[in-house]
Image (cartoon, grey):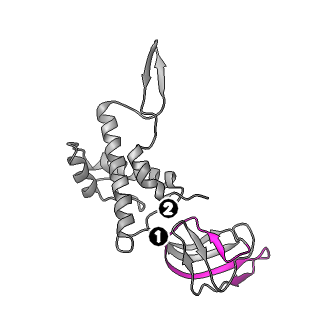
Amino acid sequence: MPEALIASAIPTLPEAKAYLARASITVDDDPLAVAVNGVAGQVEIYCHRKLKSRAYAPMTVSGSASATVVLPQWPITAFSAAAELSTTGAARTINIAGWRVSTRGVLWLPNDVFGKGFRNIELTCTAGYTFAAHPEEWDALRLASLRWIQSVFLDQQNGVGRGTGFSAGGESVSLIDVAVPKDVAFILDRFLRLS
């Protein structure tokens, strides 16, 4: 039985297998699942946020004493509640009617403000990309993941590594000097969390 894919994995095993086959790479399901899972984690680390849709109850953010807060995860696809927590533990319900989220993850409320504080706002929402709601973004994330998975196996097949290099016994070996393949980084850069 092959290793299970983690919840944040975007491509499926059949998609990854088919993508690798185009580069004449054949691999068993277990090492492929390990690579898919590893790349899923690396994509989220690179972007500084979670990308695949999931429910948050709560998503905790810091209030700004304004009608906006910067979200750690976006896009928001469902938003049911927001509360401001005081230092005494009391909660004030925040009016979320008419909410909007920018393409870079700034939540705006037209009818209320978020009180200033550190991790004092709790949002109940669903955030992240799905194929149904965000087909263009989903395809870009899937392509970046598949390409990164392919580079893992090509690096292994060609006996190269990633880093800067090393010396041993008077011999110097130069490695690929970028941890993330440049074409993958180019795709993922539009998904970066800037704050």
- Tell me the residue at 41%/54% (across/down): 187
- Position in image of residue 22 (x %, y %): 20, 48
> Which amino acid does the dot numbered 1 rest on?
Arg
| Residue behind mark 1 | 54
Label 2: few (<14), some or many (≥20) within 10 Å? Answer: many
Label 1: few (<14), some or many (≥20) within 10 Å? Answer: some
Q: Is residue 79 left or right of residue 87?
A: left
* Numbered disc 1: secondary structure: strand
Question: Which quadrant of the structure image shows residue 105?
Answer: bottom right
Q: Nearer the viewer, residue 31 or 185?
A: 185
Quarter of the picture containing the C terminus is: bottom right
Q: Is residue 128 left or right of residue 119?
A: left
Does 160 appear above or below 107?
above
Q: Is residue 159 left or right of residue 177?
A: left
Question: Which quadrant of the structure image shows residue 83?
Answer: bottom right
Quarter of the picture containing the N terminus is: bottom left
The reply to whether the C-beta atoms of the residues labelled 1 and 2 are less than 8 Å apart is yes
> Which amino acid does the dot numbered 2 rest on?
Lys
- Position in image of residue 54 (x %, y %): 46, 70
Does 40 appear above or below 82?
above
Q: Is residue 21 visible to the viewer in this orientation of the structure?
A: yes
Residue at the farthest top position: 170
Q: Which mark is residue 22?
A: none
Q: Which mark is residue 50?
A: 2
- Position in image of residue 60 (x %, y %): 63, 69
Which stretch appears magenta? 65-93
Residue at mark 1 to residue at mark 2: CA–CA distance? 9 Å
- Tell me the residue at 37%/53% (across/down): 144
Q: Is residue 1 visible to the viewer in this orientation of the structure?
A: no
